[in-house]
Amino acid sequence: MQGQASLSLFWFLYLGAQGVFFPYYSLYLKENAGLSGTEVGVVLAVIPLVEIFAQIFWGQVADRSGARSRVLALLSFGASAGYMLLGLARGFPAILLATAALAIFATAVIPMTVSVTLGALGAAGANAFGFIRVWGTLGFLLLVVLFPWILDSFQASRALVAVAGAPSEPGLEIMFLVTAGLAFLAALAGLALPREGRVALRASRGEWRALLHNRALVRFLLFSFAAYFLLQGPMWLFPVYVRSRGGDLDTIRGMWILMLVIEIPLILSAGSALKRLGARGLLALGILAGALRWTVSGMIEELYLVYAAQTLHGAMVAGLLLGGPLYLDAVVPARLRSTGQALLSMVGVAAGGIASNAAAGWLLEHVGPNAPYIASGAGAFVLGSLVWWIVPPPEASPLDSDR
């Protein structure tokens, strides 16, 4: 129970930090840091670019040493320092370098947390994972709700007011202090994470190469690249889409709250859904929910209908962000768990995300704000119908004698 409590606390604190950083960083870059549109794009692109290289490095460090919990705490301390450094950076070159430094640590935290969580939960991992992971969603939701109040209080204490030609949210740099503080608290919680048993399994030198010959893993990674390529770009463009429908920042915040509230019960029920649907069924559910969400979003204009379409976000998250790691954990040796989760993040979130953002941006500029959503939805419907053909049934790896 103590191990599960520390895992839940870590998820709550670290994803709480993301509830501050993720919704506001691009706004800070454009308005408060005064970067051009191209410079904002370059800064945001450097995160997945660094992620491609950082993921495998940290995954191998964790698997070779067996010190997964301590590596996770180190990554969190590094992320905390990175957020503080980013808050001090001024000008495009300094912000670019600070973002790259942050990405070295921060991009590996979530895959490592998944690895530690599944290892600590042992045989109950697949069924209990949702009950631990949901604390991350609760933390994210709480900070999405609380941060505007924190920002308003900071602005009032410094007599900061928005004026014409200046940032719409003066003092937004306080986000870095809040994010760094939460990441630091998460790192302290990480020091109490379980360190024995399956969390401490060690891989031998060069053993990771066996993953390249794992047919199920290779096909699943190809599927994950396609899934994130189709679904991630529209998510990053979501603020632009909402503004095209006449919405503002409060509208965006309200939609995030709605999406997260609906996501909570779906994550909690992931264990029972896994029993009924299997990992491939969860993946299909996530892809098809995303397909319907983005297709409908691209075809409607009224904001109240846009709100309704975003209720599918929870099913998309539960299907992909839970089904993916659980499938991978079934086909990768436990002693290579961290490297496997890193590969999933590297191929899907990083490489797939880079391609998705580039394609969605091109469609936005050359066709219009609806195009990324309609194209994404159509492609995702096709991919969702092919899940059982592309992804083989999950079976424990023949190399795995540790389960």
Image (spheres, rainbow, N blue to C red):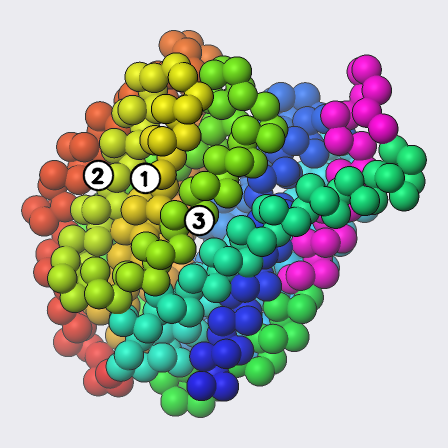
Residue at the image point whose x is 55% and y is 71% from the top: 9
The quadrant where residue 278 appears: bottom left
- Numbered mark located on residue 312 in the image: 1
What residue is pinned by disc 2?
288
Q: Earlier in the sequence, mark 1 or mark 2?
A: 2
Q: Are marks 1 and 2 in contact (CB under 8 Å)?
A: no
What residue is pinned by disc 3?
261
Is residue 237 depicted above or below 216 in this figure? above
Q: Earlier in the sequence, mark 2 or mark 3?
A: 3
**The magenta segment:** 161-183
* Quadrant of the rendering where the C terminus is positioned: bottom left
Q: Are marks 3 and 1 in contact (CB under 8 Å)?
A: no
Give yes or no for residue 165 being in the magenta stretch. Answer: yes
Q: Is residue 226 visible?
A: no
Task: Say few, some or many: other residues with alpha carbon within 10 Å of mark 2 (under 14 / 14 to 19 / 20 or more).
Answer: many
Mark 1 falls on what kind of element?
helix
Q: Earlier in the sequence, mark 3 or mark 1?
A: 3
For residue 75, side relative to residue 316 (left or right): right
Tell me which amino acid carries mark 1: Leu
- How far across and down, in percent of the image, does residue 20 sit? 63, 47
Instruction: Tell me the distance, in whole angstroms, between the alpha carbons under discs 2 and 3.
Output: 20 Å
The quadrant where residue 230 appears: top left
Which tag is nearer the camera, tag 3 or tag 1?
3
Tell me which amino acid carries mark 3: Val
* Quadrant of the rendering where the N terminus is positioned: bottom left
Q: Which sits in the foreground, 3 or 324?
A: 3
Q: Which sits in the foreground, 385 or 152?
A: 152
Give yes or no for residue 282 being in the magenta stretch. Answer: no
